[in-house]
Amino acid sequence: MLPEYRKILYATDLSENARAAFKHAVSFAKTYQAKIYLVHVVPKLVLHERELILATSGFRANVPDMISDEEKMKAATAVIIDKIRARLKRFAEEELGGNDNSLDWLGGIEVPEGTSPTEEILSASERLDADLLVFGSHSKGLLKQTFLGSVAEKVLERTSRPFLVVPLVD
Amino acid sequence: MIPKYQTVLYATNFEAYARNAFRHALSVAQHYDAKVHVVHVIPEIEISHQQYVAAMIGEERFRELSEDSNREMIGKLQGDLRSFTDDELKEHPEYIKAVASIEVLHGHPAERILQRAEELDADLLVFGTHAQKEGGFDFLGSVVKRVLRRTRRPVLVVPVGE
């Protein structure tokens, strides 16, 4: 039996140039009828940083100041997820043709919070039981060498799951 | 535009874990209707050593031996693919037809793989990696790591536990 991919973990730092790697993840998802689980590790933000995220999303306009700090932390996470989802919609419209914005290949968006992205991505891959991990790697410099991101490189050294590395060509 | 793979370069070696990586290469070929090029690189002995051996046994004999060993290696690869087909593709032996070529190359493995990828204009490279005994984690083979640092092509790495 040849392997089939069902659950694709796509790890992203949300930088704009990650799009090239994401296209490959979507290609696999559509070809194998697999689901993509987007994992974005959120740094440990302090409350006022979370409030900034809330403020720029118009959250403050709708909800008065009476909610607790804990609720604000949760609300900021929800805003991050909404922003990612909006980006994915835009991606789908631009790359998959106007009528294909259903995101039916999207299994979920995970935004674990942590100080070690490597640990968070590894544990997400276990939790999801992902059968393919997809990463972008950075291409930079005059020598036109590609460099694995440090997080990608650490994950690759420690995972026993197949992974696809997509160099980001500028 | 969403990428579609057409030309897969599968870099092999003769260890058990390579079979798992080959399964993945063939799965991609099947799903995308792509061709797989099997490449095996024999690390070249140092040029000064080659010259020494050639001087000792005679250049012609040296060349003959090299050609023999190439043929032997290709024969072994073909045998491997046949037993793979018998063992794993019982219901779909035609899947093996995705294999467009089998080649044995000599030289620095990462260099040769990168060069071959250029020549074929491969849109996906597939590798297996070693499993590390201690600690239970896999680590990237040094060849794979070198290729990852230098290629601008997508690379699928298949780590295999013991």
Image: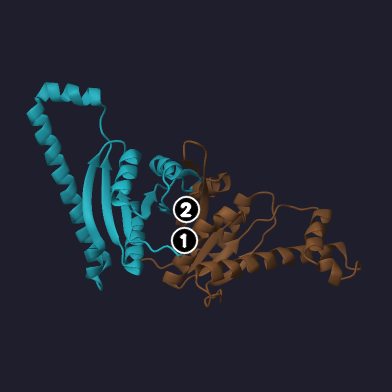
Q: Position of residue B118 (x, y in %)?
A: 32, 47
The hue used for chain A is brown
Residue carrying label 2? A166
The hue used for chain B is cyan
Above or below: residue B140 compared with residue B66? below
Q: Chain of mark 1?
A: A
Looking at the image, can residue B84 be seen?
A: no
Do the CB atoms of the residues marked 1 and 2 lie less than 8 Å apart?
A: yes
Tell me what residue is drawn at x 14 percent, y 25 percent.
Answer: B54
Mark 1 burial class by Cα count in 10 Å: few <14, some 14-19, many 20+: many
The residue positioned farthest toward the right in the image shown: A66
SS of the residue under disc 1: helix
Residue carrying label 1? A24
In the image, B61: left or right of B29?
left
Nearer-N-terminus badge (1/2):
1
Per the model, the C-alpha gap separating discs 1 and 2 is 8 Å
In the image, A111: left or right of A102?
right
